[in-house]
C-alpha cells in the first residue's frame, strides 16, 4: 500500500527571486573566501594544514551549492515577451551582474582589509583606494542603468516600485526623526546613518517584492 502523494505547491516567484538573491550573496562571500585563502597560500608558500584544505573545500562546496540554487531557480528570471519589458528586465539583470562583479573585485583586491566584504556594512572600517574606485564605478554605472530601467517600466512594475519607495520613505522619516528625538532626550545613542540607510534599502526591497509577486 502506497502513501498518498502530498500536494506540493511550487514556490512563488517572490520566493524564487529571494533564493536567487541570497544564493548570489552566498556565492560572492564564498568566492571571496576562496580568493583570500589562495592569495594567502601563494604568499606564504610551503605546505598547509589539513584544516586549511578542509575550509577551502567547504568554501568551494558552498559556492557550488549557491550556483546550483541560482541555476535551479533561473526560470523566474526568464525574459518577458514584450520588447519594452524585455529591455527593462535585461537592464535589471545587468545591474545585478555589475553588482556581483564589483563585489568579486572588491574581495579580490582585499578592499576591506581583515574584515573583507563585511567592511561594506561598517561605517568606520577603512577601505583601500583601489576598492573605493571600483565601488564608485559600480555605483555610477548601476545608477545610470537603473534610471533607464525606471523609464521602461510598465504600470504594474512601476506600481510595485513606487509602493516599495513610499513605504521606505515613511520608514526613513519615522526612524530618523524618532531616533533623533530619542537621542536628544537621552533615551538612545546618536542616530546611526549607516544603519538607517540599510533599514530603508531593505524595506524598499521587501515592499517591492510583496507588491510585485503577491
Image (spheres, grey):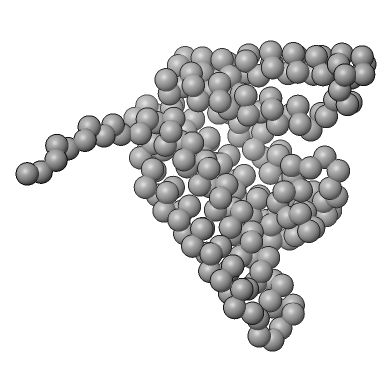
Figure quadrant of residue 47: bottom right
**Is 185 placed left or right of 129 in the picture?**
right
Q: Residue at x 61, y 24 (%)?
A: 204
User: How many numbered marks does the figure carry?
Assistant: 0
Q: Residue at x 69, y 27 (%)?
A: 199
Q: Residue at x 61, y 73 (%)?
A: 51
Please provide percent x and percent y for residue 23: 50, 47
Figure quadrant of residue 189: top right
Please provide percent x and percent y for residue 185: 92, 14
Q: Is residue 2 visible?
A: yes
**Is 15 placed left or right of 129 in the picture?**
left
Please provide percent x and percent y for residue 45: 71, 83
| Image quadrant where one finds the N terminus | top left
| Front one among 116 and 1 | 1
Figure quadrant of residue 186: top right
Compared to residue 50, the image places residue 104 above or below, namely: above
| Front one among 119 and 212 | 119
Furthest residue toward front: 1
**Is 131 placed left or right of 7 in the picture?**
right
| Image quadrant where one finds the C terminus | top left
Q: Is residue 133 visible?
A: no
Compared to residue 136, the image places residue 30 above or below, namely: below
Furthest residue toward bottom: 46
Please provide percent x and percent y for residue 106: 70, 54
Furthest residue toward left: 1
Amino acid at each position: 500500500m502506497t502513501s498518498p502523494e502530498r500536494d506540493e505547491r511550487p514556490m512563488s516567484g517572490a520566493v524564487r527571486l529571494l533564493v536567487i538573491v541570497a544564493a548570489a550573496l552566498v556565492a560572492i562571500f564564498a568566492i571571496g573566501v576562496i580568493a583570500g585563502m589562495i592569495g594567502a597560500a601563494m604568499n606564504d608558500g610551503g605546505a598547509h594544514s589539513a584544516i586549511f584544505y578542509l575550509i577551502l573545500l567547504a568554501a568551494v562546496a558552498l559556492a557550488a551549492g549557491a550556483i546550483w540554487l541560482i541555476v535551479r531557480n533561473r526560470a523566474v528570471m526568464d525574459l518577458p515577451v514584450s520588447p519594452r519589458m524585455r529591455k527593462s528586465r535585461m537592464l535589471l539583470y545587468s545591474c545585478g551582474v555589475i553588482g556581483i562583479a564589483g563585489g568579486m573585485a572588491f574581495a579580490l583586491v582585499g578592499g576591506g582589509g581583515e574584515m573583507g566584504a563585511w567592511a561594506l556594512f561598517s561605517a568606520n572600517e577603512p577601505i583601500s583606494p583601489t576598492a573605493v574606485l571600483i565601488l564608485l564605478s559600480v555605483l555610477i554605472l548601476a545608477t545610470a542603468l537603473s534610471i533607464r530601467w525606471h523609464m521602461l517600466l510598465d504600470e504594474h512594475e512601476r506600481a510595485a516600485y513606487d509602493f516599495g519607495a513610499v513605504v521606505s520613505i515613511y520608514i526613513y522619516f519615522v526612524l530618523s526623526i524618532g531616533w533623533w528625538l530619542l537621542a536628544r532626550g537621552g533615551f538612545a545613542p546618536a542616530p546611526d546613518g549607516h544603519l538607517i540607510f540599510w533599514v530603508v534599502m531593505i524595506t524598499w526591497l521587501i515592499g517591492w517584492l510583496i507588491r510585485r509577486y503577491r
